[in-house]
Image (tube, helix red, strand yellow):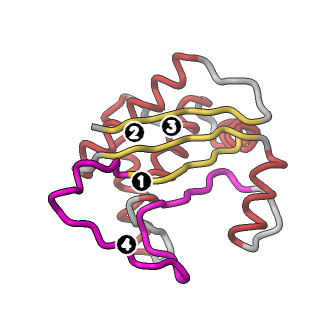
Amino acid sequence: MLTIEILHEGVEPVSEALQTLMEQCLHKAAELEEVSGEVVITIVDDARIHELNREYRGVDRPTDVLSFALNEAGEEEPDIFLDESEADDYPNMLGDIVISLPRARAQAEEYGHSLERELCFLTVHGFLHLLGYDHGSPDEEKEMFGRQEEVLQAIGLTR
């Protein structure tokens, strides 16, 4: 089971239908990855994602999507030990996905597809990053982008 919260910060809310579609994509991705937990998606403007990109990645420009995994150990964080019998008492906080709505709109136009497809692509992309996928090498990129397309096609969001 996947619990999803969609927030809007500094932008007009996307439609309920589009939010439902984004949730369907996440549920399908979670099903294919055999994972459950909690995810928060925040849809923001370019100024906010630029600020986050600069602060957390050291990249001084806006981007389309950022992912903040909450259940991977950071460099300066203490290890937390939990008795396995207590694991079900705590939610599996997978993390946060931040998406730039203006960037999604521009990319949808640039790639010649709908805003729905672009937002769902970015949602799944961010989710896979939460699960540890990356695209730093050609093999990693092929695996990650192949998985994204599998999810989008299963939902009916083809190119």
Task: Point out the residue furthest to the left here.
Answer: 85
Q: Which residue is mark 1?
A: 94
Of the residues under marks 3 and 2, which one precedes in the sequence? 2
Q: Give the spatial CA distance, label 1 vs label 2.
A: 12 Å
Q: Which residue is mark 3?
A: 120
Of the residues under marks 2 and 4, which one precedes in the sequence? 2
Q: Which residue is mark 4?
A: 80
Of the residues under marks 1 and 2, which one precedes in the sequence? 2
Task: Point out the residue furthest to the bottom here.
Answer: 75
Image location of residue 76, percent across then percent down:
55, 82
Q: Which residues are magenta?
A: 63-92
Q: Are marks 3 and 1 in contact (CB under 8 Å)?
A: no
Q: Secondary structure at mark 2?
A: helix
Q: Give the spatial CA distance, label 3 vs label 1.
A: 18 Å
Residue at 71 percent across and 56 percent down: it is 63
Q: Give the spatial CA distance, label 1 vs label 4.
A: 16 Å
